[in-house]
Image (spheres, grey):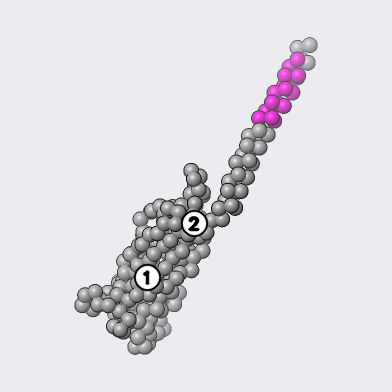
Amino acid sequence: MGVKDCGHHEDKRKKLLKRIAFGILTFIVLVLLIILIIWAVLRPTKPKFVLQDATLYSFNLTSPTQLNSVFQVTVQTRNPNDKIGIYYDRLITYAFYQNQQITLPTSIPPTYQDANGMNVWSPYLQGPSVPIAPYLGAEINQDISMGSVQLVIKMDGRVRFKVGTYVSGSYRIHVNCHAYIPIGNTDNGIYVSRNVIKYTLSKSCDVSV
């Protein structure tokens, strides 16, 4: 009788563990389903970025294969969601000329953006004597002589979305802002100080999350 009772208790224990496991799994599935339904109803939209202006301090070749550049850009970001906030956990800004990075990365402090909120960042981008390919040096000289240089301001980082008290996991964000800077053309710029010109751009950026 003792052996039979032991087996009976063991079966009851296994059934109880299975019910507990099933209950926990059902609860997790329901929570995830609720989150998914809320997410689908709210329809989260990626943030909008606009490159407002660029203030050029320096952009010149120190040698045929070295570029020196210092400028400040103003980037406006807007959260188009009515009920979703955005955490910008990490955001790094740098400039490219024809697929080559020409400035050191500049970090933007972590920040939170409310629903329908707006932020404006003005990072300085510096590239002291950056080595470049010889053919790029020739093209930069040609662009400067033509009075316009095309750069791409890139921003890479991590974002999280907040719905009520729920905060999502971390997502990668990539921003590309194409900037046509009319170097030497004072008609399209404003002198901030001697040899420093601010150019208004108002260019929408490509954003992927």
Question: Is residue 17 rendered magenta in the image?
Answer: yes
Q: Amino acid at mark 2?
A: Asn
Residue 138: quadrant of the picture: bottom left
Q: For the stretch drawn in magenta, what is the main secondary structure?
A: helix
* Residue 194 drawn at (x, y percent): 20, 77
Residue carrying label 1: 52
Above or below residue 48? Residue 53 is below
In the picture, the disc for residue 81 is: 2
Above or below residue 16? Residue 24 is below
In the rendered structure, the answer to whether residue 14 lies left or right of residue 144 reads right
Which residue is more in the foreground, 69 or 29? 29
In the rendered structure, the answer to whether residue 18 lies left or right of residue 36 reads right
Q: Amino acid at mark 1?
A: Gln
In the picture, the disc for residue 96 is: none
Residue 103: quadrant of the picture: bottom left
Report the residue at 66% width, 30% height from top.
20
Which residue is more in the foreground, 40 or 171? 40
Tell me which label, 1 or 2, sits earlier in the chain: 1
Q: Which residues are magenta?
A: 5-21
Q: Label 2 crowding class (10 Å Cα cut-off): few <14, some 14-19, many 20+? A: some
